[in-house]
Amino acid sequence: MKNIRSFLGVLDKLNKILDQNQRLRGLKILFWMLVSSMFELVGIAVMSPFINALLEPRVLMENEWVVYTAQILGVESYVGFLAILVIGVIIIYIVKNILLIYSRAVQLAYQCQIEEELSLTMLRSYLMKPYSYYVQTNSSDIRHGAIDDISNIYNILQVVCQLMAESLTVLFIIIYIIQQDWFMAMGITIAAGLTVIVLALGFKNILRLTGEKHRIQDLARSRNILQISQGIKDIFVMQRKEAFYAKYKESYDKYRKTKITYSVIGACPERIIETIFIASICLIVFLRIGQGIDAMAFVPQLGALAVAAYRLLPSINKFSNGINTIVFYQPSVEAAYENISSARKSFQMDAGKKKEECSLSFYDRIDIQNIMWQYDSAERKILENASLEIKKGESIAIIGESGSGKTTLADILLGLYKPENGNILVDGQDIYCDLRQWAQIISYVPQSVYLLDDTIRENIVFGQSEADDDKIWDALEQAQLKDFVRNLPEGLDTVVGESGIRFSGGQRQRVAIARALYSQPDILLLDEATAALDNDTEAAVMEAIDSLKGKKTLIIIAHRLSTIKNCNKVYEVKKGSIIDVTADFA
């Protein structure tokens, strides 16, 4: 019974995962299932008169519908009558199977749409999470939540649709068998019911355990391959290829074993069901003959019943495999249920929030007022009562020891973190009242540049729907990369490669500067943008940055003193405070 409870529990969670609109759309699927099941029954029912016509020609010759059709067509012979019946049976099966194919297409379209909608729901919920969530969460977990778990929901939804369709078909077939021979109907129904129960109980523990292991190892497999692709340079330099290969192989071996176990279990029901059904039919026929029923008179019924039983075999197999599949994917359903429930609560809370009306502009200054920040895992505050004033057009440098809070300050300025206390004001307005407007005012160049495996154009517009080539060339000119790009054979259409591997470090950094300048911001924040560059490359990049002084307000988070020599003011982040140390660099 544990498997049955798990099965029902998964169905309950699936029902809660689908919203009202998605459930209502499922009624269309139910309608086509009903139509398909009725035509399945017609396909079975037509076999009894066909067999009768073969065994007793008189029955065919006296059928009013056949006679009426024959008169219209001018047919008088038995062969002609039989031809009409054969054509009728063929037409019925053609229509039946066209409807079944269409019904299947409607089901698949519904399932794929649900999969897409749920995946988009998950992605939207991830994008609504704060930046701190991504700092603490592995990217493989996010991929698993938005893609893999939702794909398994699709698998389960597909199984549920199959079970509903097969349930209707089985119900109609059982009604038909009862009408033909109640004794045989009872025997086949009992055999089918016992088979499903035995199979469901037989694999109750191993499926659940295998499903949990399958999900864990699939996640480990994804994580390992992602780590290899992201750390490939270090792996080659340190000659750790075999170690990472072995780690991936270990996770794949465990994943493979769970897949084999599930596949073997999936193959068992078909063999067991076939054996039980054939044995049941033979036994029932033997008992009916033993009751004195004329074997020849029983042949037409037996033929129709054999067709019905033959049709029932895959249905019972699908029932058994369906229950097993749902139990196997139960861990994914539970994870998806928790994620989607959390996502919908977040959407409701976000929709219920009263949006502040404000208009951000930068004509005078930025005020950082007594901000405080402490990471969840940290024992001490990174920033405490830190204050700073930045005037429009200034170039300021922020220095400090590693771990002092320079990058944290930059992240707070960018709106990625909201300080526990204190304010970030631009011309007297809190930047958090509208981060979209703030993103138009401030732009960012990081130390580790992320480039899309796409063209230079797409890397500069970075997700914006329309690209303005004039603005792109202007941004490239300000980043001192215009001549380099113009001399490339494909110009802006040059593909930079994964993570910009086809460009040098300095070129990648200047693409990042051009990207930051494309939106024409008032403020440019550079977080140790030259720390990873050699001296000559740093000098070239700094030349591009220095050319912006006076045109943009520059905030430079610096590690090397060479990058701050032309700044108006220098501030040091120390023991949670921001100290003006400009005089030390005069």
Image (tube, rainbow, N blue to C red):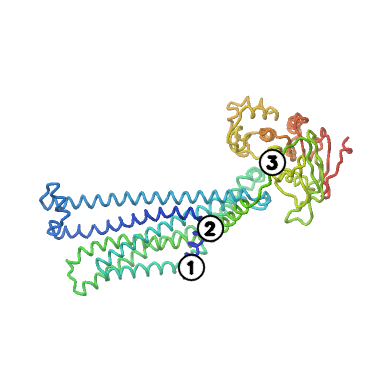
The kind of residue on which mark 3 rests is: Ser
The kind of residue on which mark 2 rests is: Ser
Q: How many marks?
A: 3
* Numbered circle sitting on residue 181: none
Residue named by callout 3: 448
Secondary structure of the residue carrying numbered label 2: helix
Q: What residue occupies the far bottom of the structure in this picture?
A: 291
Q: Foreground: 187 or 453?
A: 187
Residue at mark 1 to residue at mark 2: CA–CA distance: 17 Å
* Numbered circle sitting on residue 5: 1
Mark 1 vs mark 2, foreground winner is 1
Residue named by callout 2: 332
Residue shown at 23%/62% (left/top)?
303
Mark 2 vs mark 3, foreground winner is 2
Question: What is the quadrant of the C terminus in the image?
Answer: top right
| Mark nearer the N terminus (1 vs 3) | 1
Q: Foreground: 135 or 236?
A: 135
Residue at mark 1 to residue at mark 3: CA–CA distance: 51 Å
Residue at mark 2 to residue at mark 3: CA–CA distance: 35 Å
Assess disc 3: are there few (<14), some (14-19) or many (≥20) residues with their C-alpha within 10 Å of its C-alpha: some
